Image (cartoon, rainbow, N blue to C red):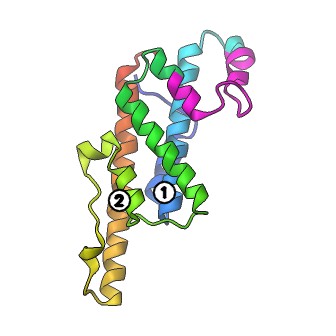
Amino acid sequence: MPIHSNQESELLEELAESANAAECLLCAFDVLEDMLDALLKSIFHKDDYAVKFVVDPLLTNDGPLGEILVRTKLLLGLGVISKEVYDDIEIFVTLKEWVKVQEGKIDFWDKDIVFELNKVNAIQKNMPVDYSPELIEGMSADMQKMFLERHFQKVRSTIVLAVNDIHQQLSRDNALTS
């Protein structure tokens, strides 16, 4: 059974249309957070009363399960998500924090971003991010701009595929979501 969140398709569309690296990484984080929220609610969903008065307060930002890493640790501990999915989500949390530290001024050709993205299992399986500064050496400014734009689009598509792969894993591994 697929995991359905209120905003899943809208967030995936927004991710696919993100205009820059910071927006793309923040959106990927939001999609993953939304998926985990839907998964937790499906696990603890016994009746509408329980969700409204017991589960929802636990999941608010100031609740004990408000932080995504706490949620993922709980899901990992319960055996609901794999260590691989946990690790991927943890990397996207790291990337979100990096975007904040850099005040949104990041690019997909930044060696730290490329390094972190290539640690994501879902990216390693599908299409590792390949970039080094030597690739654009000797190119004219216009050619560099075109190359970097194409690289951005490739990495954005890779992230969309990775997030979708994580979603598929969560859906496949959790028949609890009905």
Q: Which residue is mark 2?
A: 155
State how many labels appear: 2
Q: Which residue is mark 1?
A: 24
Classed neighbour count for the residue bearing mark 1: other residues with Cα under 10 Å, few (<14), some (14–19), many (≥20): many
Residue 49 location, x and y as percent? 72, 12
- From the viewer's side, name the closer residue of 155 and 110: 110
Residue in view at x 34 percent, y 88 percent: 142
- From the viewer's side, name the closer residue of 44 and 121: 121
Q: Could you say which quadrant of the image residue 130 lies in? A: bottom left
Residue in view at x 25 percent, y 51 percent: 127
Q: Which residues are magenta?
A: 51-73
Reply yes or no: does residue 71 show up in magenta: yes
**In this rendering, would 57 be left or right of 35?**
right
Residue in view at x 39 percent, y 26 percent: 171
Q: Could you say which quadrant of the image residue 138 lies in? A: bottom left
Res 87 seen here? yes
Q: Secondary structure at mark 1?
A: helix
- The amino acid type of the residue labelled 1 equals Cys
Residue 36 location, x and y as percent? 52, 30
**In this rendering, would 3 be left or right of 101?**
left
Q: CA distance from mark 2 to mark 1?
A: 10 Å
- The amino acid type of the residue labelled 2 equals Val
Q: Is residue 173 above or below residue 21?
A: above
Q: Could you say which quadrant of the image residue 82 lies in? A: top left
Instruction: Quarter of the image for the N terminus: give it.
Output: top left
Q: Are marks 2 and 1 in contact (CB under 8 Å)?
A: yes
**Label located before the other in sequence (2 or 1):** 1
Question: Can you name the residue that lies furthest to the bottom here?
Answer: 140
